[in-house]
């Protein structure tokens, strides 16, 4: 059991504190300040709401949605009440400037402490970091002044439900139907803003920011560019699309609508481009699914970063939440906080998590081996001969309009045969270096250009084939020397992973 602390005070340095036992995740406070009617006024109605809630909590230690709705309707008889889930996106619309919404701190509100220790005396509520659990926001939109209450309550002692309660004056409502057109229009605006296809993607790098650079990279990706084992590729596509298509199925069988996938394998074998293809495919659905990409937790990561990530995801749900290099993000000090958020003390409905790692054995077993957290693990092995041949065909298509360099179909199979054991990343390096060297040779003069041929019987004289063989030999030599360096270092020190020095960054920002 956790404690809900109820506090009535006009000064945070003195007052009466009453503690009530209840199943609550954080210590919360209700702060009452001096009377100030302000622009919106109507303090008496809010006092009735707070009084009813306090009476109920002190008597039963429970706060239900029915109580919140009843208290609000009783206190605001001249308003129409419209309830909508917090996931509708009203907060996101307000933060973007879509409408004015300000927490009224001149009246009572519930707020959860964000810090356990305070330095010196705190004279004003704004000196504290807090997350509002229950409070009234004064709102203005389309010449209508209204209220939006934010409320959280427990359902079945397990699920933490967050709702917004819109109170609109009756003159902006359809009296016969007791429906607020203002509230309906505002909800529609929030939903439209939520699914709006922006030329940016939300990225967390110690804080949330929009990235147009990442979007430019993602919008050029599609499943046709992903060269994988066909069975693996089809299973991945089905897994992702079926999750967002089958919300009602999850509900009908009583299963939480959330899922987690882990993509693992040595670097350079297609995990990053697969994630990009997933992001692009979800963005192109009739109702686009947004992506939140976690790049890093910043220079001084703590549990507030984990909290911020999942709060953003719940607000954006249904959404894709990407953790690239998951093993480096979730450190031992953050492990318990991460697992608590994944397990969903709050609701995680509509969140598909996709995490990637180069080394599955480095992941905490609580993440990698607990099905209810990350349900499926997809291995990305070194490409087999058919995949290597298709990758060569990809480069052959890029040279289709180049009349000075000839790339016959037979050459793809020949290159695939001699490149066994190389990842897609190394194959890319082979082709980039090959094309660069050929361009430099052509600029210097036609030394070998005339030796190329399109006949299969004379592939050996093809200049692309000759240059590719040279680059593959260089890479194999570099890999051998790197392994020798690792072996030499291992004789004098202890290494966590003998192959770690061969890992090359493959993240979106690389």
Image (cartoon, rainbow, N blue to C red):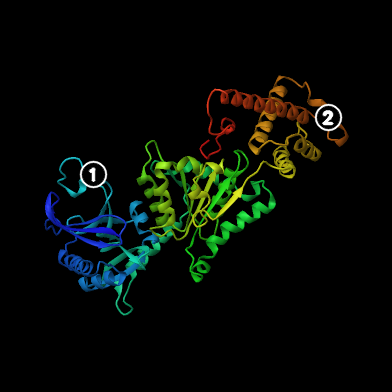
Residue 180: in sight, yes or no? yes
Q: Secondary structure at mark 1?
A: loop
Query: Residue 234 versus residue 203: which sits nearer the camera?
Result: 234
Q: Mark 2 or mark 1: which is in front?
A: 1
Q: Residue at x 57, y 43 (%)?
A: 272
The image shows residue 497 at horizontal and vertical percentages of 56, 34
Q: How many neighbours does mark 1 have within 10 angstroms: few (below 14), some (14-19), or many (20 or more)?
A: few
The disc placed on residue 117 is 1
Which residue, given by chain and number where applicable, does mark 2 sit on?
460
Q: Residue at x 65, y 43 (%)?
A: 381
Q: Would you place residue 147 above or below residue 311 in this image?
A: below
Query: Residue 405 versus residue 164: which sits nearer the camera?
Result: 164
Q: Quadrant of residue 393?
A: top right
The disc placed on residue 353 is none
> How many callouts does the rendering have?
2
The image shows residue 503 at horizontal and vertical percentages of 58, 34
Of the residues under marks 2 and 1, which one precedes in the sequence?
1
Q: Would you place residue 268 above or below residue 24 in this image?
A: above
Q: How many neighbours does mark 2 have within 10 angstroms: few (below 14), some (14-19), or many (20 or more)?
A: some
Q: How far is the residue under mark 2 from the one under mark 1?
A: 73 Å
Q: Secondary structure at mark 2?
A: helix
The image shows residue 284 at horizontal and vertical percentages of 55, 55
Q: Residue furthest top?
A: 444
Circles 2 and 1, Cβ within 8 Å, touching? The answer is: no
Residue 77: in sight, yes or no? no
Query: Is residue 383 found left or right of 208 in the rendered image?
Result: right
């Amino acid at each position: 059991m956790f404690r809900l602390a109820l506090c009535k005070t006009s000064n945070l340095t003195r007052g009466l504190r009453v503690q009530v036992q209840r199943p609550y995740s954080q210590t919360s406070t209700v702060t009452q300040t001096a009377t100030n009617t302000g622009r919106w006024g109507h303090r008496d109605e809010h006092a009735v709401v707070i009084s009813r809630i306090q009476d109920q909590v002190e008597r039963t230690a429970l706060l239900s949605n029915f109580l919140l709705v009843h208290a609000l309707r009783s206190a605001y008889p001249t308003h129409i009440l419209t309830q909508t889930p917090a996931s509708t996106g009203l907060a996101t619309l307000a933060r973007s400037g879509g409408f004015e919404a300000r927490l009224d701190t001149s009246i009572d509100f519930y707020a959860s402490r964000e810090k356990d220790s305070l330095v010196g005396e705190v004279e004003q509520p704004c000196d504290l970091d807090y997350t509002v659990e229950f409070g009234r926001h004064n709102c203005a939109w389309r010449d209508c002044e209204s209220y939006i209450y934010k409320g959280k309550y427990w359902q079945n002692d397990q699920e933490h439900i967050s709702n917004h309660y819109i109170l609109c004056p009756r003159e902006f409502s359809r009296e016969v139907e007791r429906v607020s057109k203002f509230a309906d229009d505002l909800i529609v605006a929030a939903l439209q803003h939520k699914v709006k296809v922006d030329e940016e993607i939300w990225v967390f790098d110690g804080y949330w920011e929009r990235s147009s650079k990442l979007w430019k990279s993602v919008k050029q990706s599609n499943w046709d560019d992903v060269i994988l084992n066909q069975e693996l590729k089809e299973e991945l596509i089905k897994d992702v699309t079926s999750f967002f298509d089958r919300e009602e199925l999850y509900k009908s069988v009583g299963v939480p609508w959330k899922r987690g996938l882990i993509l693992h394998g040595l670097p350079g074998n297609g995990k990053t481009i697969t994630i990009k293809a997933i992001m692009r495919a979800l963005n192109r659905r009739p109702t686009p699914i947004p992506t939140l990409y976690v790049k890093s937790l910043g220079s001084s990561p703590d549990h507030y970063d984990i909290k911020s990530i999942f709060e953003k995801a719940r607000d954006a749900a249904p959404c894709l939440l990407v953790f690239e290099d998951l093993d480096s993000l979730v450190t031992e000090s953050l492990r318990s906080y991460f697992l608590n958020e994944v397990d969903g003390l709050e609701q995680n409905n509509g969140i598909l998590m996709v995490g990637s790692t180069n080394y599955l054995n480095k992941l905490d077993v609580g993440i990698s081996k607990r099905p209810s957290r990350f349900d499926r693990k997809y291995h990305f092995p070194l490409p087999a001969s058919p995949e290597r041949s298709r990758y060569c065909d990809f480069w052959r298509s890029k040279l289709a309009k180049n009349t000075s360099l000839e790339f016959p179909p037979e050459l793809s199979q020949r290159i695939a045969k001699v490149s066994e054991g190389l990842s897609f990343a190394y194959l890319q390096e082979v082709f980039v270096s090959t094309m660069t060297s050929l361009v430099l040779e052509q600029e210097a003069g036609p030394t070998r250009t005339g030796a190329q041929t399109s006949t299969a019987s004379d592939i050996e004289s093809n200049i692309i084939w000759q240059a590719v063989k040279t680059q593959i030999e260089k890479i194999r030599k570099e890999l051998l020397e790197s392994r020798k360096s690792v072996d030499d270092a291992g004789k004098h020190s202890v290494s966590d992973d003998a192959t770690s020095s061969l890992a090359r960054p493959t993240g979106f920002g690389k």
